[in-house]
Image (cartoon, rainbow, N blue to C red):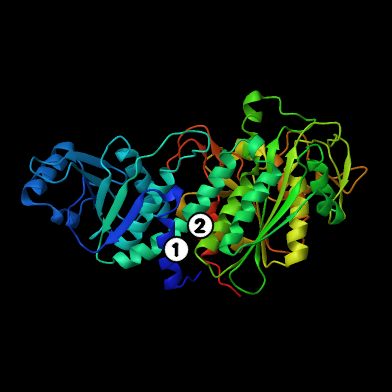
Amino acid sequence: MLKTSKSTLAVLFASLLSLPAMADKVNFSSELTASGETLVLFKVKDTDFPGARVLSDGSLTHLERAMQVNGFDGGEGEMLEVLAPAGSQLNRILVMGLGDGKLTDGELNTLGAKLADKIAAHKDTRITLIAEGAPDAANLAAEVAHGFDLKRYQFGRYTNKTQDERELSFALSDAKAAATEYARLAAVDAGVVLARDLVNTPAGDMTPEDFAAEARKLKSLGVKVTVLDAKGIEKLGMGALAGVGKGSESGPRLVVAHWEGAKGAPIAMVGKGITFDSGGYNIKASGDSISHMKSDMAGAAAILGTVKAMAMQKAKVNLVAVLPLAENMVSGDALRPGDVLRTAQGLTVEVMNTDAEGRLILADGMWYARTHYQPRVLIDVATLTGSKVRALGREYAGIFSDEESLVSGLTASGAAVGEKLWRLPLDKAYGDELKSNIADMKNTGAEGSAGASSAAMFLKRFAADVPWAHLDIAGNALSSSEKPLSPAGATGFGVRLLSHWLAGQSAD
């Protein structure tokens, strides 16, 4: 497991509360009192209700009557709101159902998000939650607070909107354990906020150089950040990344962000960073599709957010992020359909479709991670294919790997936090579709075939013999409507999943 010292957690917890993205205050206290303006109680279905003991006899009778009249029994996610009786210092009492009490962290996060939605219309700013008596009260308190933070995110770069601050006070006997766990989760939330901010920013303000500038800010947390420009990329023979980026005036970049919290061979993560994807000469025909292409760097954003989460909690893990960045544009210098690129690995690629550019830049990024860092594990994350969306929709991301331990570990972490993965096939038949008459391979498979799998087989050749997994998060990174844990817009998908998985990795 990742280890974090008590002193580090204390500093982290104190500093997180002062960040703009963390304007809401979260406190943990061992004083079991009904205070504030809104009181929140938790109830396991068909069991006693120990948290309600903080209420006066009159308030308790009032609440029990309301539960009986409304048929409220504590089913998972159910919520009952009652106005406090006259003479009470409270304005309202909320009861949240825990079902059988055996909830995953992600399900507890969803309860916190529901609470955020519920109080959004109220002017109450001081909310007390009685976690004492709930199953695993310390974890419940921390995870509910985490979900509250995730849902309260706002992207305010282009607006003057302000958000009312709320103060959450969790009452439970093991307040110290809850505060320690929340400090770790607040670091993860900071990573999610970074990923969301990067993806939400319009492409005109988030060029490869702009993204690199955001990455450089992590130096203040102890992250080693290196940026290669177009000349450096060409010098290393990274013809695929250079080829995709040459159509843009901004030019490509390669960002390396290394959090060396432990020694030994690192875990390497490579993220697709197409800061805008016009499709190139195979231009995206749909206006609706192309208008969302600021999100085609969501893989790189998720990985950079994960690096931030690890750095903020001083995690004992050796993590290197390699982020190839480019704009896929149309110009007189742009890549043409039918061109042949030479990758840094030495393999040549016949470009059959300039809108299949993500796998090209990932190929050079994976080579760089593999040859410069000799990682023990290699994971790439990308909004790679529309085929994945057609196969799985937006509820699941796709995972491709021949490594059973990687598939099971990453899938379990996704299930725990609610960022779900579904395994899709790797098969030689999909790789055979990539054969070219004039180059080592093509960048697309047969028309009408399983495009997500043929793209994964393309990437597999650049993983070589390193244990590798590919996550296709197309459809998961940006939402046109509100999600359970996020407002409309960027979701930050991947940061929580990868952070949870990393917490289970023992440093060498």
Q: Can residue 35 be seen in this view?
A: yes
Q: Can residue 501 be seen in this view?
A: no
Q: Is residue 21 above or below residue 256?
A: above
| Picture residue at 55% right of the left edge, 43% below the top | 197
Residue at the limit of the structure toward the right, as seen here: 438
Q: Is mark 1 on a helix, strand or loop?
A: helix
Amino acid found under the numbered disc labelled 2: Ser
Badge 2 density bin: few <14, some 14–19, many ≥20, Cα 10 Å? many
Residue 204, horizontal then vertical, whole percent? 66, 35
Q: Nearer the viewer, residue 201 or 360?
A: 201
Nearer the N terminus, badge 2 or badge 1?
1
Q: Name the residue under label 2.
A: 413
Q: Which of 162 and 465 is in front in this view?
A: 162
Q: Is residue 488 above or below residue 234?
A: above
Q: Is mark 2 on a helix, strand or loop?
A: helix
Badge 1 density bin: few <14, some 14–19, many ≥20, Cα 10 Å? some
Q: Place residue 462 in its image quadrant.
A: bottom right
Residue 438 is left or right of residue 363, and the answer is right
Residue 313 is left or right of residue 209, and the answer is left
- Check residue 57 in the rendering and tell me which mark sits there, or answer none: none
- Check residue 12 in the rendering and tell me which mark sits there, or answer none: 1
Residue 264, horizontal then vertical, whole percent? 65, 74
Q: Which numbered mark, 2 or 1, is in the foreground of this view?
A: 1
Residue 43 is left or right of residue 439, and the answer is left
| Picture residue at 11% right of the left edge, 48% below the top | 60
| Picture residue at 14% right of the left edge, 40% below the top | 66
Amino acid found under the numbered disc labelled 1: Leu
Q: Place residue 377 in its image quadrant.
A: bottom right
For the residues labelled 2 and 1, the Cα–Cα distance comes to 24 Å
Q: Which of 166 and 398 is in front in this view?
A: 166
Residue 478, horizontal then vertical, whole percent? 55, 38
